[in-house]
Image (cartoon, grey):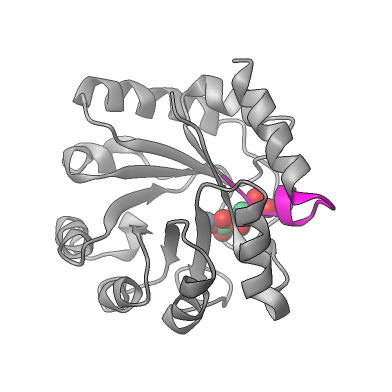
Amino acid sequence: MTFRIAPSILSADFARLGEEVRAVAAAGADLIHFDVMDNHYGPNLTVGPLVCAALRPHVKLPLDVHLMVKPVDRLVPEFAKAGANIISFHPEASEHIDRTIALIKEQGCKAGLVLNPATPLSFLDHTLDKLDLVLLMSVNPGFGGQQFIPSVLPKIEEVRRRIRASGKPIWLEVDGGVKTDNIGEIARAGADTFVAGSAIFGSKDYAATIREMRQKLAVL
Ligand code: DX5
Ligand code: ZN
């Protein structure tokens, strides 16, 4: 199993964002997780395509854009143009989920569907085969630094079963409350990609924190 660590810039110093993404890249991150909220679907107001485009030249790592916006479709080409590599969205925020997935792929990006802690897995019934990534929220969208919701663990197990049955190399990413002390059990449940905001950007030594996460993953 290949594990990936995706620092979320939501907990970075927004006044020094270029420096911060270069620092986590140098510290061994695999992806840069970019949280987009619109104060409508996502209860916060963060960053848009302009900031994504501004960060693009600072790192070679894939930009993993997590859209917590409604409507979704108009922003997809904007983020593709701004250098996003992965674009994920919430089914509740799209009127036509299949169309949004197709739109993301037409723009040359990988497509992900994001399920909140209380969003049923039935949204994967007719979409999984078309997805590159399933992102399970282990907090409710909005803010960094919230507590991991443990009832998401059996959900991770179930999604891993479905991905295995599909035979496709679909990533299973988990977002919210991931720390060095729970990343092992989240991986054991079946996740392969880990978003971590406050755990990394809130630590003194980004490289040491990412190294500790990888050590926890190595002994599974
Ligand atoms: C929450 C965001 C998360 C957030 C995670 O709405 O989607 O990506 O940054 O932050 P931590 O890792 O601090 O829970
Ligand atoms: Zn996120």
Residue drawn 17% across the image and 38% down it: 129
Q: In this orientation, which residue lies closer to the viewer: 215 or 195?
A: 215
Residue 57 image position (x, y, % from top left)? 48, 74
* Left/right of residue 86 with respect to residue 56 in the rendered view: left
Q: In this orientation, which residue lies closer to the viewer: 102 or 205?
A: 205
In this rendering, is residue 37 above or below 61? below
Image quarter where ligand 1 lies: bottom right
Is 209 part of what is drawn in magenta? no
In which image quadrant can residue 66 be found?
bottom left
> Which quarter of the rendered picture does the C terminus lie within?
top right
* Left/right of residue 175 with respect to residue 41 in the rendered view: right
In this rendering, is residue 153 above or below 29? above
Residue 217 image position (x, y, % from top left)? 61, 25
Residue drawn 36% across the image and 42% down it: 134
Farthest bottom residue in view: 50
In which image quadrant can residue 208 be found?
top right
In this rendering, is residue 55 above or below 5? below
* Left/right of residue 116 with respect to residue 200 in the rendered view: left
Residue 172 image position (x, y, % from top left)? 41, 36
In this rendering, is residue 167 above or below 72? above
Number of numbered discs overlaid on the protein picture: 0
Is 204 part of what is drawn in magenta? yes
Q: In this orientation, which residue lies closer to the viewer: 61 or 133?
A: 61
Residue 182 image position (x, y, % from top left)? 68, 30
Residue drawn 73% across the image and 57% down it: 201
* Left/right of residue 18 with respect to residue 72 in the rendered view: right
Residue drawn 67% across the image and 24% down it: 216
| Magenta segment | 195-206
